[in-house]
Structure formats: structure tokens, C-alpha cells
Image: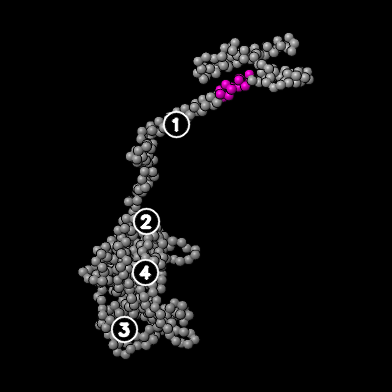
Amino acid sequence: MDDESRNDNNEVINDEVDTCVNDSETKAEEYGESKAMTEEEIRAAAENIGASPYAGYESRENSYSSYTNYDYSTSSDAYNRAAEVKKPRAFKRIMRFVGLATAFGMIAGGTFFGVSRGLNAVLGENSFLQTSEEATEKNASTVLKQLGVSNLVIANTSTTEAKGFENNAVVDVVKENMPSTVCVNVSYTATQRDFFTGRTTSYEVTGGGSGFIVGENDEEVFIATNHHVIEKAEKVTVTFSSGDEVTGTVKASDSNLDLAVVSVKKSAISGDTLLECRVATLGNSDESQVGEMVIAIGNALGYGQSVTVGYLSAKDREITTENVTKKLLQTDAAINSGNSGGPLFNVKGEVIGINCAKFSDSSIEGMCFAIPISAAIPILDDLINREVIAEEDRGYLGVSLREITEDIAELLGMPSGLRVQSLIEGKGAQQAGIYVGDILTGINGKNLPDYDSFVSEVSSFRYGTKVTVNLKRMVNGEWTDMAIEVTLSKRE
């Protein structure tokens, strides 16, 4: 290597040495070392490279140098020095990143603290959840109070208790009134005539509805239900909320308003069930407001007591069934088959209606109906206090009747009702002046369009009682309404 090249090389080394000295001092400061390398130590280390440890390296170096005009010993030296310089620079980058992250964390923490202090100034010092269970409940209630929200269940990791449900009005109504509601199951024998052979076969038909306790005396418990639930019943079984089943008796019914009363002897009810039973509280449906919440309890589909909830949709809805028009309450609480006769409660736990019907159509949703309790109370009172008449003492009209349905009446051009087919001589109807061909429509002004309801009404009176029979008679080519007083006979 000539002198000029050597001088140039020395200048490079000097520059590198100065850089390393500065970096060494900086590194010592960063690492906290007690003493940095001196300039002489660094220069000695840079110049004392020494011979290659590999044999023949110098001769190859000389031949390559002539071709590339590059000093490999200088390159190796510079590489080692560069490596020494890069180490503290990489550490600087790491420390710079850590410093930036720390600064970001401090800024974010300060921001959160500032926001917290600002919200505390608005919502109060204890608005945010603390670590203790007591602080959690206190803070949650404070926030809800500030937001105007109440009756919410606040999640708490330290407990699984659901708070707020003890004040649920529907739950309270159901708990209080379930013991006053019952299932009313009936059975009767039906006959069917074979079209080809003419033979008649008999089979048992079962059905079910609902009811609720409306009164009691020393011997009996009285249950209100619908007339259509028990109208054909030969056997009535009452199931209380405890699960006890007791045989009941139809005391009386009113087909016009679709009401009936079933009585159960207290002696047939177990002591525990009797203690649990309670008479339902009757409200005033006239004072009920459209839009208020209502709760229906009943024996839906015969599965046992169940609960549905809705609102009072309308009052005084006129519904006509079997030529009888009733004014009913309308609700969207589901009233399904088996709910008939069950109570409709308001949120106070008062009965405001007796569930009786629903519109069933693919295009209709939530149109169910109940008999207003204000209209039902006097009828139920009469049914409860009506004398129970032994079968041999029941009144008898003395006629043979054929039911004329609306379809038949339209086809024949005559009124619907019960056509007198024949009269028994000497009995009440014949003596009062009722004729064959008259169409009977009711008793004492009560519309009784079907055979079962008419016979049931007549049988509810003791023989010898005078009743008014409402009928239609053909006079001068026109059907004319008439009312004839008849003294009921005794069946023989």
C-alpha cells in the first residue's frame, strides 16, 4: 500500500475513531457505566488488526487487490467498527419506542382522569363503579337515579340474585289469584246413527273449560264459569290449583248471558286444598279503562292453569252468537280453547271479566272477548241463590220440540227457534193455548234459541210455577210475536 493510500486510510480511521468515542461516551451514559473507552484505546484497537488467521490469505489478498483495487483488510476493519456503532443506535431506537409508548399512556391516563372528574362533577362523586360490592350497588343506583331509570336488574359479579322482580305486578296477581281459579272438565254421552245400517252407537265426549271461586257457604264452594262449558255435561270434575280433583254439580245456568255456577261440597275437598282456596275479588268493569293491562288465567287446551297477558282493547263490543247479542270486553290477551269461564284480572288483582270467546281466522290476531263482570254479578248472584230442585220436582211444559236452526229457517222461510211438533194433553202448554206449529223462542223474555238451553231453563223452575213463554205464531200470513203465561206441570 503506497503512502497516499495509507494517509487516506488513516483519515478514515480517525473519523471512525471520533465517532466511536462519541458513541462510547453516549453508551456509557445510557448504561450507567463508570468509565468509557479512551481515544487511545479505541485507536489502538482500530490499528492493531493483525495478520489473517488463515494460511495464504495475504497472497490472495494481494492478487485480488490488484484486480478490484480494494483493500480487504480495510473493509474488514470498517465492518467491525460499523458493528460497534450500530449496537448503541439500535438500543436508542428501542428506548425511543418505549419512551413514546410511556408518553402515550400518560396522556391517555390523564385524559381519562379528566373525563372522570368532569362526569363526577355532573353525576356526583360516586357515579362510577368501585371495587367493593357495597360501592357497586350504591354507584349503580346513583347513575340510574340521575338517568331517570328505575326497576332495572343490575348485573353484579358477586351475586346471582335478580333484584326488582318482587315488584312485578303480573307475578303478584298470579300468585294471589291462582288459588281462586279452577279447571272445569266435563263429560257426556253422545250418539251417532250409521247412515247405511241405521244403527245408533253411543260414545263418551269429554271437554274442558275454566272457572273461578265467587262465593261459599258453610257447605259449598261456588264456581263461576260459562254456560257453554257445562251445557251438555253429565259429569263435572273441578280441579283446584293444588291438583285435587273433586266432583261438582251444575247448580244453575243462564244461556242468554252464557253464565253458569258449579257447586262443590266442602266435605269432598281435602283440608289443605280448602285452606288454600280463596274467593276471587270482583272489580267494576264499568270503571275499567281501555289500554290498561289485563291478565287471563285459564285451562288452555286442557293442559292445566296457564297465564296470558294483554291489554283491554275495547269496551261494549256487540257480538252476536246464536241470535243472542251481547256487549263484551275486547282484549288481546290470548283466550284459547279451555280458557272459557276463566277470570280476566286487572293489575289490582280484581276480576273485571269472564273469558268467553275469540275470533278465529287467519286474517285476525288478538280479538278475544270477556263478559263484563258488572253485568255478570247480578246473574251470578241469582244463580248462586237459585233453589236447587230435585229432578222429580222440576217443571215440565208438556211439548215435543224440533230445533229450527238459522239455515233451516232460511230454507223454509220461517223463524228460527223451537217448533212445537206435538202437545201432551192436560199439561201446561196445551192448557195455556200453545198450538202445534208455534215456534218457541224463550222464557220470561230470555232468548233461548236451542233445545238444550230451553229445556234447562224450564227445568230450573219447580212445577206449579208460572212462567211466560215467548213464541212466534203465524197470524194472517205473517209471523207474529206473542207471550203466553203457562203454569208448569210435573213430569210423570
User: Which callout, 3 or 2, points to the residue nearer the camera?
Assistant: 2
Mark nearer the N terminus (4 vs 3): 4
Gap in angstroms between the C-alphas marked 1 and 3: 92 Å
SS of the residue at dot 3? loop
Classify residue 129 by image quadrant: top left
Left of 161 or right of it: where is 385?
Answer: left
| Residue named by callout 3 | 397
User: Residue, x 50% and y 18% (percent of image)?
Assistant: 32
Quadrant containing the N terminus is top right
SS of the residue at dot 1? helix
Q: Residue furthest left?
A: 218
SS of the residue at dot 2? strand
Residue 320 pos. (x, y %): 41, 69
Left of 233 or right of it: where is 75?
Answer: right
| Residue named by callout 4 | 209
User: Residue, x 40% and y 80% (percent of image)?
Assistant: 203
User: Which callout, 1 or 2, points to the residue nearer the camera?
Assistant: 1
Predominant SS along the magenta part: helix
User: Which callout, 4 or 3, points to the residue nearer the camera?
Assistant: 4
Quadrant containing the C terminus is bottom left
Q: Amino acid at mark 2?
A: Met
The foreground one among 405 and 209 is 209
Residue 62 pos. (x, y %): 76, 18
Q: Amino acid at mark 1?
A: Phe
CB atoms of marks 3 and 2 within 8 Å: no
CB atoms of marks 4 and 2 within 8 Å: no
Query: Does 84 appear in magenta?
Result: yes
Mark nearer the N terminus (1 vs 2): 1
| Residue named by callout 2 | 293
User: Which callout, 1 or 3, points to the residue nearer the camera?
Assistant: 1
CB atoms of marks 1 and 3 within 8 Å: no
Residues drawn in magenta: 81-93
